[in-house]
Image (cartoon, rainbow, N blue to C red):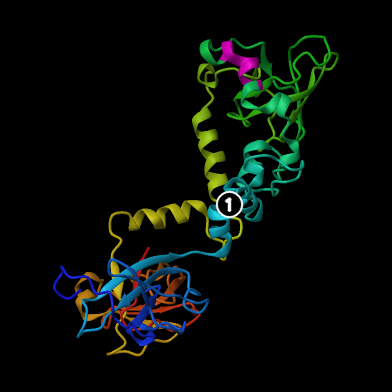
Amino acid sequence: MTDMVTEEVVLTLAQADMRLSKDGGAFAQKNASGNATHDSDGWYSTTLDATDTATVGELILNVHQPANMLPVQVRFTVVEEAVYDALYAASADIATVVNASIVTYGLDHLVAVADADDVVDDSIIAKLASAAATANWSDFVNTTDSLEALRERGDLFWQTGWSANNSGTIVGASGASAARLSAGSTTNDLYNGQQIIITSGTGAGQCRIITDYNGATKDVTISPDWTTDPVSLDTYEIYPASVNLTTIENVDATDQINTEVDNALDTAIPGSPTASSINEAIKRLARSVGVVQEFTVDTDVFTSTTTQAQVDAVDIDSLEATDDHYVGRVIVFTSGVLKHEATDITDYDGTNKRFTFTALTSAPANNVTFIVV
């Protein structure tokens, strides 16, 4: 219709009158041949082919004959075949697709462990389960190490604290995983599974699990090994495995816990292209919170390459004038053929507002947008 009232029912809408924009690209005539045909009440139907719908993202169909009708625009979303089938196929099963993706990206051990070695050694998850020098998921025993098992063993201890079962001094020199006590029961293995705390002296502040106790010699074997071997006359106390550490005098449990957590967070991220740590990644992201801004590439004043691009003049005042200010941060493209592609910034020209970065799959086009995180 041209008057917003009268229905147009006899228009001849040719292929050339119907133009498509694929995922933000320039409009072009649709590939599928044939005219649009009138259906009813001024509505027309047409066909699109595989070429027309080959680009994932937003698809815009624009139909216009200036002399005969007002422009009509219809928007569609093109998704991957697997996504469409998961949602609309006769046998659609989203749960199956999601589960397959979890396995593909190595996250299945967070839901259900397929085998004892499913988690990579020395990963953060392995370190939460294992006290070994090289953290091994196989060390985790569900019946004794799970949260439920810990709770059942120690509800009373966590709530009220507990007095030491045994205390005294270390006798002679200790080994890397052993020590001799000045006092204790004559019953073998009585203290197995309990905690020995070095409360003063050379080894002060260390807490270890007793794995074996000899009642005749009063020798204990501990795990993991001492960081610093206790020496003769260092004082110790032995507590039940689930004792509340805040009730133990002369032991700064907070420092020890903070050290272990910090060591875990400083581990390189699995699969990261660089040896960056989670701590570093968190700090970098924190710097971007609340200041993420979208910029536009300008190829009129500088021709982009796969490793360089310059921003539009309207964005200049929003960028720092200091050279190398953004080095080490990441560019993420938000439109065009590079949409969702990311690259790290290796150099920044503060005068021209020009970024240098690790090579992209193609040079950024004029007016495509990006953010810096």
Q: Main secondary structure of the magenta part?
A: helix
Where 51 sits versus 199, above or below? Answer: below
Q: Quadrant of residue 143?
A: top right
Where 17 sits versus 89, above or below? Answer: below
Residue 26 visible somewhere in the drawing: no
Q: Residues within 10 Å of mark 1 (few under 14, many from 20)?
A: some
The residue closer to the viewer here, 178 or 279, is 279
In the rendered structure, does residue 326 fall within the stretch colored magenta? Answer: no
Question: Which residue is pictured at 57% across the width and 48% down the height?
Answer: 94
Q: Residue furthest left?
A: 3
- Residue 177 is left or right of residue 28, and the answer is right
The residue closer to the viewer here, 261 or 181, is 261
- Residue 90 is left or right of residue 42, and the answer is right
Identify the image quadrant of the N terminus: bottom left
- For label 1, the residue is 267
Identify the image quadrant of the C terminus: bottom left
Q: Secondary structure at mark 1?
A: loop
Q: Position of residue 13 (x, y in %)?
A: 33, 82
Residue 314 visible somewhere in the drawing: yes
- Residue 344 is left or right of residue 148, and the answer is left
In the rendered structure, does residue 156 fall within the stretch colored magenta? Answer: yes
Q: What range is drawn magenta here?
A: 149-157
Give the residue type at disc 1.
Thr
The residue closer to the viewer here, 326 or 255, is 326
Question: Which residue is pictured at 28% across the width and 90% down the height?
Answer: 300
